[in-house]
Amino acid sequence: MEPHRRTQTMALAPALALFTAASCANPPPLSDGGKLARVEQMSDDVERQFPDVETVTVAEVGRLLEAGSVVLVDAREVREREISWIPGSITSDEFEQDPARYADRTVVAYCTIGHRSSVYAQRLTKEGQRVLNLRGSLLSWTHAGGPLVGPDGPTHRLHVYGRDWDLAPSRYETIW
């Protein structure tokens, strides 16, 4: 390399490093397709962490809902559920007060992405109650077009637990 060109390249190195660092700090927003791909990736990670927890897809839950043979259990914290939930779902506290009431139904737990509901399903399954985990949980549900309700009825607001889980479709207002 010529001495002049080496000086120019060396002078650009700090600027390139700064540009690269800034680009990594604030990556461009993901498209809905990119968000869904990330949800799938995170769901795979959850399944690897909980290989003994049975999962069910949104499509399978839809069929169970049509048949009236499922109870959806929201394993999230109260502050998250205050924003929105899957219509007809119950809280984990409600379920645990009388699990025998749901003995004739498939029990499916959900949270934001499936980690906490996997912990919940694993615990209850070890206690003798078969509980499945909704793969991708609320994020997969919303990407599939599943409805949410809030205190005032149908909503497009969703508590996503934190920045790393801000993967809801763009039609949703996310809160954490």
Image (tube, rainbow, N blue to C red):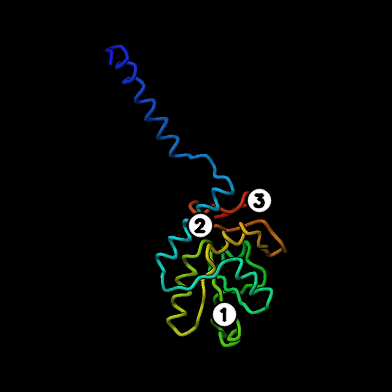
Give the mark nearer the N terminus: 1 vs 3: 1
Q: Nearer the viewer, residue 76 or 32?
A: 32
Say if 3 sits above or below 42 in the image.
Answer: above
Query: Residue flagged by tag 2: what amino acid is it?
Result: Glu
Q: Image quadrant for the N terminus? A: top left
Query: Residue flagged by tag 3: what amino acid is it?
Result: Arg
Is residue 78 found left or right of 9 in the rendered image? right
Q: Nearer the viewer, residue 28 or 173?
A: 28
- Image coordinates of residue 176 in percent, x first then y, are 54, 55
Question: Spatial distance from mark 2 to mark 3, Cα to Cα?
Answer: 19 Å
Residue at the image position 44 percent from the left and 65 percent from the top? 47
* Res 95 label: 1
Say if 100 sits above or below 131 in the image.
Answer: below
Residue at the image position 29 percent from the left and 17 percent from the top? 6
Considering the numbered disc 3 on the image, is that residue within a helix, a strand or a loop? loop
* Res 150 label: none
Judging by the rendered image, the residue that carries numbered circle 3 is 171
Judging by the rendered image, the residue that carries numbered circle 2 is 40
Query: Residue flagged by tag 1: what amino acid is it?
Result: Phe
- Image coordinates of residue 156 in percent, x first then y, are 67, 56
Considering the numbered disc 2 on the image, is that residue within a helix, a strand or a loop? helix
Q: Nearer the viewer, residue 146 or 44?
A: 44
Q: Where on the picture, by quarter, is residue 52?
A: bottom left
Residue at the image position 50 percent from the left and 51 percent from the top? 163
Considering the numbered disc 1 on the image, is that residue within a helix, a strand or a loop? helix
Is residue 19 found left or right of 62 in the rendered image? left
- Image coordinates of residue 124 in percent, x first then y, are 47, 79
The answer to whether mark 1 and mark 3 are in CB contact below 8 A is no
